[in-house]
Structure formats: C-alpha cells, structure tokens
Image (tube, rainbow, N blue to C red):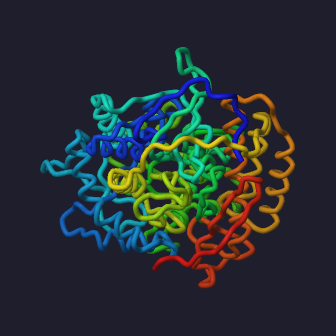
Amino acid sequence: MKLLAGKPGWTVTADVIVIGSGVAGLTTALNLRSSNLSVLLVTKARIDEGSTKWAQGGIAAALGPGDTPDQHKKDTLIAGAGLCDVAAVDVLVTEGPEAVRKLIARGAVFDKSDSGEIALTREGGHLRNRILHAGGDATGAEVSRALLAAVQDDDGIEVIENALAIDVLKSDAGRVCGVTLHVIGAGSRDGVGRALARAVVIATGGLGQVYAQTTNPAVSTGDGVALALRAGAEIADVEFIQFHPTVLWRDDSLSGQQPLISEAVRGEGAELVNDKGIHFMKGKHPQGDLAPRDIVAIEIFKQMKESNSPHVWLDTTKIKDFADRFPTIFASCIANGIDPRKQLIPVSPASHYSSGGVKVDLMGRTSIPGLYACGETACTGAHGANRLASNSLLEGLVFGTRISTDIAANIAPQSEPSKSTSNDFLLSPAIKMTLQLAMSQGAGVMRNEQSLRETLTTLEQLSAHTSNEPCIEAWEVSNLYLLATAIVKAALERCESRGSHWRSDFADTSNQWVKRIVQNYDEDGKWSSKLEDVKL
C-alpha cells in the first residue's frame, strides 16, 4: 500500500536519509557524520519548526548530587505502569547523562543556579530534581538551536526543507533503499522526486494532530509512523496517547495546536483547583499535583465532568518571579488576556505525546532491513504505558546515537528500488476535522467500547471519501486516518485501564494485559495484530 503520487521527476543520493529535524533526527545526523557518512536531512517545514523547539520543561538525566541512573530508572518504570521494556529503560537512564554532556559540548546552554551549577528542577513522576532547563521554559528551543548550528556547519549534511516523505522505496530483496519525496517550492527538486540511500532513519516526531486539540505543531501528522506502516513495518503501543494535563484552555471551538503550561510550573509550586477553589489533587496521589501525567489528566477529566466545565484552574499566583522563570508561558498567558501573577489559568488536557510508534529494537532497527526509527516516531518500549516527564528529549539523544553507531557498523551497499506494484491510497482533505473530532470524543482521555466502536464506524465511513488529486493536505489526512484506525483498534483490544489508556468499562489494571499490542498493515490494506510479552 502506498500513497497516490505523481512519478518522481528527480533523484538525489546519500549514504543515509534522516527524515525529521527534531532532537532525534539532528542527533542521528550529526553522529553519522562522525563516521564520515553523507546525510540527506529531510524536514517537512523549515528545519526549526518541529516539536523539539516547543518542549518547555527540559531534559531528564541523573546529573544532580546523590541522583543515580537507578533512581531515574525506578521513576520511569513506575510512570510506565508495568509495560516498560526494562532493557530499553536501562539504556535510556545509563547512557542519558553522557548524551546530555555531549549536547552541552555541542553548545547547548542550560540555566545555572546561583552557585554556578546547572539548575535542576522537578516534574511529575520524578522523586528527585533532575530536569535540566534552558531559558526558563524554552529548553527545546535551546536544544534545537545548538544542534541546528552544528548541522549547518557540516558540509556533509544536505538539508531539504519543505519536503514531505511520501513512501519508502524497497529493493527486490525487501530492503529499504530510499524514499519518495514531495518538495514544495521552486527549483530542480520541486514536486515529487526520489532520494536513494543505504539506510533510512524516520524521526518525524508525533501524531498529535490526530486529535482536535493538541500541544503539537501543525506538522505533527504522524507521517513517519504511517510511512513505516505502509511499508509493512510493525507498530506497537499506539493506544497509549499521553494527554498533557495542563494546556491553556481558550475555547472548545479552537482546534489545532494549543499553548502548553509546562509541568515545571507545578514543580515550582502551582496548584490545580476546581471551580469551588478546592485543591483537588491533594490526597489523590502521594505526589499530589506532581503525580504522573496520566493520573493528573484523569483527575482533571473527572473534575470537569462533575462540574460540567470545559476546564479546571491552575493557581500560579504564589510563584515568585513567574515572568522571569517562565517567560514563554507568561507571554502566552498575557497574549490570551490572563496575568498568571494575579489570575488563575484555565487549563484542560490535550493530546501531547505518543508513547507508542514504530516498533524498534535497542539499536533503533525496525522490522524492515535498512529502516530505523527514533524519537517519538519510535516505540523503544522505554516509555511503557505512559512516558515520564522530560524523558522524550533524552530518548532522542540516546537512541539517535545508538542508531548512528549501528548504521556505521552494518550499512549495506546501495540497492536499486524494485518496480512497485502496491495499491494506491489517498483520502480527501475534507475529512480532517470530522476525523479529529471523532477521535477527541471517542478515543480521548476516557474511552469505552461504545465510544471506540462509534469512532471506528466514523473512520470506516470516512474511508469512502477518496481523492485522485495528490497534495500535501491529502497525504497528511491519509496518514492521520491510518494512525487513528491503529489507535482505535488497539484501544478496543486492550480491555483494561493502564497508564495513559483509560477505559471506563474496564477501570482496573489487569495482570493479563502485561502485553504489547503489535500491529501490521499489509499491501492489500488489511490490519493484523498480535500480543507480545513485555521484556521485564
């Protein structure tokens, strides 16, 4: 199965193609250059417009006095609700500190304490202060800046901006040997072309735009996961969609990317209150307002339902020097008519992060030879059923390094693409809003069999709205459709509540479901799934 597109009008080659310019893609590209491999870095918009720059909280790593990777591991396993791949967590927490040091060596500047040491804060699920931050609440932007500067200084990395990766190319032997691209803009590479390489790394970020309201930028339409799916790669854990509990509520009619109120704000003392002014997280969890995100999001959902209100409130009025500590959030609040130094901030959950994605091993290899995945696109198993706060940037750093090491050691000769006979597939852009609303209403924070089946019925009806006019919007909505279908099917199959997957009809966590749901989509457009034991 592949997306309907025109015939490629141009060809470019490199040793490795990296799709995505967030922390995962940039880290992979830079480390590949250490092995003298040429890199083609493909990014959907401008090179600095991915999800990484929106990361407010920071990077989690055991760098503080008395902190250890083992303590970081314990917090990660608790947040993951029994579904973490322990070996993947070990890799994340033990290789994380060195990955952060390397990032600092590349020029990333983190906030310092009065004593001159790197300032560390705490976020939900962490029992120690281990979150590095930059510019108060602009960590992602600083990480992106440092990595981009290094990439732009390297002549061995060619960057193609405003390019959507449509489908992978495979050899007769089934090995990935490139991708088809659509480049928006003038020049010899305008329109559809093909990029050939000896290995392909997908690092396209998240799929938040599957939902009506999200913290993700507009480019986060899950293109990488959908591309891997159509190529025959396995995906896993996609039912575990993390809803960030505190997103600035403005109006239910507003869709797309919404302003995020970082968890670090609660780490500095902010409290969640309901319409009656009651601090409702007190007594609900030992960590109160800093409980893991799934716990907080569900409690907010319950409070909203009880009061029939579209939001709860975040009280930040006691935080000293709010505007200096959180300049980005302060500016966002002021722009929306709220002064967080004096007023409560209306907040509600919105889709934020996918703990699942393309299933990979500890070296980032997918089930298809020559194809790798990294960052939010991938499912390493490190996040389990719910990602621990600020482990995402760390995962991109750690596994981007591992992927580049594996490619350098095992890269195959360039092979020629086979003549594809796959069926073409394309849906109309007109279905996008209906799809997003159906997912938010039926497969959001709280789900049940009825809501999920109604959503699946809506998706099946939308599949009839096909298109014969290839364009960015049609490719994106076709990707969203595949991902929405995968999420709903997995959510229906998992008959329990665990981590960021909550079923009102199966409210308890079941030991029978210490399983990973692995899905596959074949060339005829048929879905299949299997259960795999979690590697504890």
Q: Nearer the viewer, residue 212 or 360?
A: 360
- In the rendered structure, the answer to whether residue 335 lies left or right of residue 406 reads right
State the image coordinates of residue 69 (x, y, percent, origin top left): 28, 69
Residue at image x 72%, y 44%? 421
Q: Nearer the viewer, residue 382 or 284?
A: 382
Q: Nearer the viewer, residue 135 or 485?
A: 485
Residue most extreme to the top: 186
Q: Can residue 318 be seen in this snapshot?
A: no
Residue at image x 34%, y 58%? 60
State the image coordinates of residue 4 (x, y, percent, origin top left): 73, 36
Note whether 494 is above or below 471 in the view shown.
below
Residue most extreme to the left: 115
Note whether 123 is above or below 73 in the view shown.
above
Residue at image x 45%, y 43%? 414
Q: Can residue 243 be seen in this snapshot?
A: yes
- In the rendered structure, the answer to whether residue 100 lies left or right of residue 73 reads left
State the image coordinates of residue 381 (x, y, percent, origin top left): 48, 66
What number of labels is visible? 0
State the image coordinates of residue 427 (x, y, percent, origin top left): 78, 39
Residue most extreme to the bottom: 511
- In the rendered structure, the answer to whether residue 172 lies left or right of residue 146 reads right
